Image: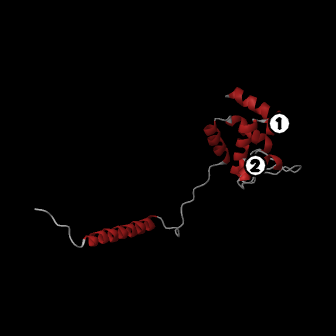
Amino acid sequence: MVRKKPKNHWRAAITVAISSSLLSINMAGLFLLQFNPFQPQPFVPPTPPREYLAAECEKLGYDCLLLDTIAFCESSWHMVKNSSSSAFGYFQIIDGTEQTTPQYADGQRKYDPYTNIDMALYLYGKRGSNPWNESRGCWQWRYRQALRSE
């Protein structure tokens, strides 16, 4: 016995299309039940800057102790402006140096704590500790002391 194709095979296609549309609407409704943008979301605090530096150093294979010591000597880990220059932030990045970073090219500025750290990581990757030679007397001694105590 040979089965004949139903004459109204397009009805089956329409039924499937309507069913899947209803399914999508139901799934969207379910999503709205799970996430409502009008309900306050729990606050997730940002990673503290020193922990952020440590995590980024680990990813990049950089000497975190050295960079932490540089930030301590430059600003005591405060986002401050140097009163006698354009230096700002944890790593006291000056305007001319800031302008050489990809973060600056992307519109980010040294005034954001995490951008300040990212700029310092970029500079360290390109030029080592040279951007912070002015404070070498402070951080080199502290760094050596920290290495001895480890």
Picture residue at 70% right of the left edge, 53% below the top: 106
Mark closer to the observer (2, 1): 1
Residue 142 placement (x, y as % from top left): 77, 33
Element under disc 2:
loop
In which quarter of the view is residue 120 placed? top right
> By what rule are the colours in the image chosen?
secondary structure
Residue 3 placement (x, y as % from top left): 15, 64
In which quarter of the view is residue 140 placed? top right
Which residue, as the protein is rendered here, is positioned at the far right?
84
In which quarter of the view is residue 50 placed? top right
User: Hey, what amino acid is under mark 1?
Assistant: Asn
Quick one: 19 or 27, which is closer to the camera? 19
Residue 59 placement (x, y as % from top left): 61, 39
Looking at the figure, which quarter contains the C terminus?
Answer: top right
| Left or right: 130 as drawn, with respect to 45 | right
Element under disc 1:
helix
Query: Measured along the vertical axis of the image, is residue 143 above or below residue 4?
Result: above
Which residue, as the protein is rendered here, is positioned at the far left?
1
Quick one: 21 or 145, which is closer to the camera? 21
Query: How busy is the neighbourhood of tag 2: few (under 14 within 10 Å), some, or many (20 plus)?
Result: some
Residue 7 placement (x, y as % from top left): 22, 72
Picture residue at 70% right of the left edge, 50% below the top: 115
Picture residue at 74% right of the left edge, 45% below the top: 77
Q: Which disc number belongs to residue 100? A: none
- Label 1 sits on residue: 133
- Label 2 sits on residue: 78
